[in-house]
Each structure stands twice: as C-alpha cells, then as structure tokens.
Amino acid sequence: MNIMVVGRGGREHSIVQKLSESAQVKHIFAAPGNAGIKKGAECINIDENDHESLVAFAKDNQVGLTIVGPENPLIDGLVDRFLAEGLLVFGPSKAAALLEGSKHFAKQIMQKYEIPTAEYQAFSEVEAAKAYIEEKGAPIVVKADGLAAGKGVVVAETEDEALSAVDEMLKHGQFGAASREIVVEEYLAGDEFSLMAFVNGTDVYPMIPAKDHKRALEGDQGPNTGGMGAFAPVADLKDASYETALESIVRPVAEAMVQEGRPFTGILYAGLIETEDGPKVIEFNARFGDPETQVVLPLLENDLEQVVIDVLEGKDPGLEWSNETCAGVVVASKGYPGEYEKGRPLPELSVDEKVFVVHAGTAFADEEYVSSGGRVLLVGSKGSDLAQALDQTYQSLHVFDDSDDFFYRRDIGRSILSSLMHTDKK
C-alpha cells in the first residue's frame, strides 16, 4: 500500500518513522514533509491546507491510505473531501474536529454529558470577561477559543495578568479569529498527563499515557509553547486514575460525539489533570499530540499501518506496548515562542542505536541542516526506566549547550524522578 502523511512537523516525522517499520507499506509520501522526513518518505511540494491538490495527488499516485497529522486541515474539512472522493483517510471529519477547533464547543459537550472539567464561562465582550475574572479571582485560566498553535492559553497567577490576557485576546486580536471569543476557566491544581486513543465512533483503543512539558523555561516557567519535551509512560500515574480517565472521560466523549451526530474517527487526544477529585479535562485535540507522539509511538509494538486499517474496519487492533520508557527533549530556536531567527545551522548530533532524532522545524541548505521553525527537533531515547532514557537523551544534547541560536529544557522528567526517588526512600 502507498501511504500519504499530511503535515510537516515532528509529529508527522514520528508517524513516518513508525510506518517505515511496516513490511506492508510500499511507499510513503509526505505532504509537504520536512528535511528530516525526506530520509523515510518522498516529500511532495503540496501544502497541508491545499485540499484539492492533496486529493488529486492521492488519486494520481494510488495512495491507499492518507493519515492527516495537523489540526488545521482537519478543522477545515480535509477528511470530508477525501471521503467524498472515495479515498481511505484516517482523521476526524470537520464536524468532529470542532472538539479541538472550539474550546467553547468542547466545554459545552463536557457540560452536557457530565464529563469532568474546570468550571468556565465563554466571552466575546471585554468588560463581561473582566467582571467574571474579578468575581472569581486568581489564579485563573484564559484561553483563546480557536487554534493558536499551543500558545493561546494564559495561566494567570494574578488578576492583573488575567485582565491583560483578556485585553490582548479580545481587544487587540492577539490570535486573530481564534481569539474573537475566549474561555475563562477555573485553575485546576494537580499533575497533568496526556491520554491518546485510536477511535472509530464508540470504539476506543487507548494508548499508554504520556506527560508533556508546556512551559518554555525550566521549572515550568515562561510562556506556554507547543511542548518542550515529553515521556511515556507516566510512572507516577495511579492505575485507578488511568482507568477513571478512560471510563469517565475518553469513552464518554466518543459516545457523546456519536449522540451529537458528529461521530469521531481518528486520534482523540485528552489533555488531563489528576486533581484531588479525580482526573479532569484541560483540553481535547483531534489528532496525535506533539511532542507526545514522538515518545509514545516508539513504544508501540504493533504495525501502525495495520492498526489504522483495523480501526477503520471496526476491528480491535490488539495494541501491544513495550515495557520500556521513552523520553524526548525539544530543541527550540532562541526566542521561541516569540520571535526567532530562521536558517541557523544545526550542530552535528552524536546519536547511536539508543538515541533517535525527530525533525520538526528544519530545512536542508548548503549541505547542512538549518532551522526553519520555533521547535526545531526532538532528541529521544528508550531505556529500561525514565532515568536511563533521560540520561541517554541528554548526553546527545550537549552539542547545544553553548549555542547562541538554540535552547532546550534541562529538567524534562526531573520532578517525576525526584518524586519517585523520594517514594523509594520511604
């Protein structure tokens, strides 16, 4: 089978890497792909939002299956176009992808079907939003309703910070159409984790949980980003919390979407937090998470192509997972998630059979890799436990230590390790 992966980031590179292991895959196309993806797929110069060209290419090149990676083409209805042409595609319809495309819509679904989440209100008027914040106090969370590349969330520790976020989003249009409406919700305390699942209607096949690090700087400081590192599984997550999340959140929301006439097919991502009252939803995404995918897929022992086909055909894929741990750390351009320079040359990474590299924002120019985005690449490793996986990963990252062009967080997974060591000593 010829397969096409739509997208250009680290998530898509990780999907291509996993598909490359399959003996059933004849040829992989990536649209448009990136410099690293070229090693495992044929990159084609079609933008991921150019629906008509993608459909035409799939027809002309006997593409038997298309996997859509990023959120924008999903929310704009790319899957609907493929289905209308009788093409096999993996991802949610435009109607189902609204679960990610509108935080207000997602909150309405959770409220209607009693899926645990933070208390909230949605606003399109500045003064009403500010009055709500002044009534509730801080800490409090302000979110752009639409897509903002992982940057549309402000966890405000003071009222002034929250009020400023309202001005930026509603008054000054910080995120354009995405922040014409905002959601203001209560701050939830606890440990966050991500739970992704292969879904087809009410059929839900969960993956192992992962933990992402959203803040740009060490100690979980600085602005929110698309993700600065991740690891899987989450060693300190209680089995009961995982089962509760699956049975009270992931399965119910899949069933709710069917009830709403918006059946979900594809990857359902639940960003969750383990509170004193049990797991609650922070957000839903309608696709593989990034960078969680980069540390979850390496632990999947099944053939990814077969898993997707099975799910689409209504069969249980029988997911099997390695008992290892996988960790990954993102290297980002200096200045990210704000302004940054592109075209900066990347140092040569020292990797071995234990360490892998996933490209995100890279290009190839003058016989070397250069940066082309904010999150440039992810360095990852599998180990017998989290400590080993992280040690192997960080050994390879030393080449960036004195860089004026790039930075990475040196504390990915460290708080979990400290907690586990403290528990072991007890």
Image (tube, rainbow, N blue to C red):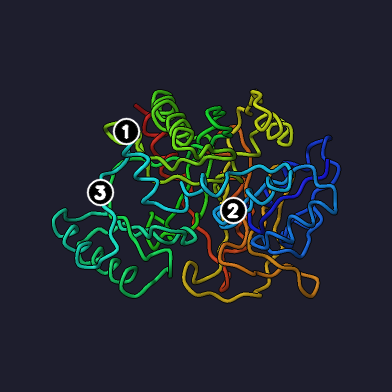
Residue at (64% x, 62% y) in the render: 49
Seen at 57% across and 28% down, the residue is 205
Which residue is disc 3 drawn over? 186
Q: Are marks 1 and 3 in contact (CB under 8 Å)?
A: no
Please tell me whether mark 2 sits on a helix, a strand or a loop: loop
Q: Amino acid at mark 2?
A: Gly
Q: Does residue 61 show up?
A: yes
The residue labelled by disc 1 is 114
Q: Nearer the viewer, mark 2 or mark 3?
A: 2
Q: Residues within 10 Å of mark 1 (few under 14, many from 20)?
A: few
11 over 254 or under it: above or below? below
- Residue 320 position (above or below residue 221): above
Residue at image mark 2: 77
- Which sits in the foreground, 269 or 102? 102
Mark 1–mark 3 Cα distance, whole angstroms, equals 17 Å
**Which of pointers 1 and 3 indicates the residue nearer the eye?**
1
Alpha carbon separation for disc pair 2 and 3: 32 Å
Secondary structure at badge 1 equals loop
The kind of residue tagged 1 is Glu
As drawn, 325 above or below 142: above
Q: Is residue 66 left or right of residue 139?
A: right
CB-based contact (under 8 Å), mark 1 and mark 2: no
Horizontal and vertical percent position of residue 287 = 56, 46
Extreme residue in the left direction = 135
The numbered mark, 1 or 2, whose residue comes first in the sequence reads 2
Within-10-Å neighbours for mark 2: few <14, some 14–19, many 20+:
some
Q: Is residue 424 visible?
A: no
Please identify, in this view, whether the residue under mark 1 or under mark 2 is nearer the observer.
2
Which picture quadrant has residue 181? bottom left
Dot 3 falls on a residue whose secondary structure is strand
